[in-house]
Amino acid sequence: MNLARKLGLHEDTYSVTIPLGATINMAGAAITINVLTLAAAHTLGIEVTFASALLLSLVATISACGASGVAGGSLLLIPLAASLFNIPNDIAMQVVAIGFIIGVIQDSAETALNSSTDVLFTAAADPTYSR
């Protein structure tokens, strides 16, 4: 909220969008789900069509809205996304394990993306912001 204030965004806008975004805007989680699922599909030699990639993005985005805001919360949605490509659950859980191994870096990047997109969407929604 401090960044939104420094950018000159209208307080009536960011006082609603920032807390709402902190609750449901999980762009980092959606990207994590997409990247790790597509990596698993590629590793297994599964062909990913544009339509299936688009469906994966949609499922990951909607699922990420319900992801818990704890470290590794988005990783537990990977088996759901992996099921779109008929990836067995034991392999999907191995991908989750890899996610936990890289968790410190991955969670930091995910949190940075979540927070920055909250301010980005607020600036896009603010009719008085003109930069």
Image: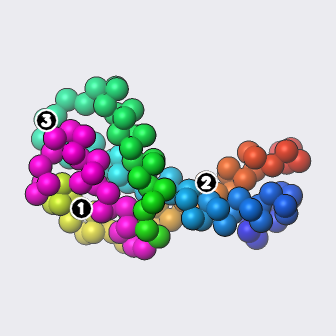
- Marker disc for residue 131: none
Give the residue number, with chain letter if any, for mark 1: 96
- The percent position of residue 81, horizontal first and vertical second, equals 29, 47
Earlier in the chain: of badge 2 and badge 1, it is 1
Q: Is residue 95 left or right of residue 52?
A: left
The numbered mark, 3 or 1, whose residue comes first in the sequence reads: 3
| Residue 90 is one of the magenta-drawn residues | yes
At x 43% / y 62%, what residue is drawn?
A: 67
- Whole-number angstrom distance, CA of label 2 to CA of label 1: 25 Å
Q: Relative to 86, say whether 119 is above or below.
A: below
Q: Secondary structure at mark 1?
A: helix
Q: How is the image coloured?
A: rainbow
Within 10 Å of disc 3 (Cα), the crowding (few <14, some 14-19, many 20+) is few
- Between the residue at mark 2 and the residue at mark 3, the CA separation in whole angstroms equals 33 Å
Q: Which residues are magenta?
A: 70-91
Residue labelled with disc 3: 45
Is residue 113 visible in this depiction of the protein? Answer: no
Which quarter of the figure is the C terminus placed in? top right
Q: Residue at x 15, y 60 (%)?
A: 94
50, above or below 12, in the image = above
Mark 2 Cα within 10 Å, few/some/many (few <14, many 20+)?
some
Task: Name the residue beneath numbered marker 2.
Answer: 117
Mark 3 secondary-structure assignment? loop
Check the picture and name the quadrant holding the N terminus: bottom right
**Quarter-of-image position of residue 68:** bottom left
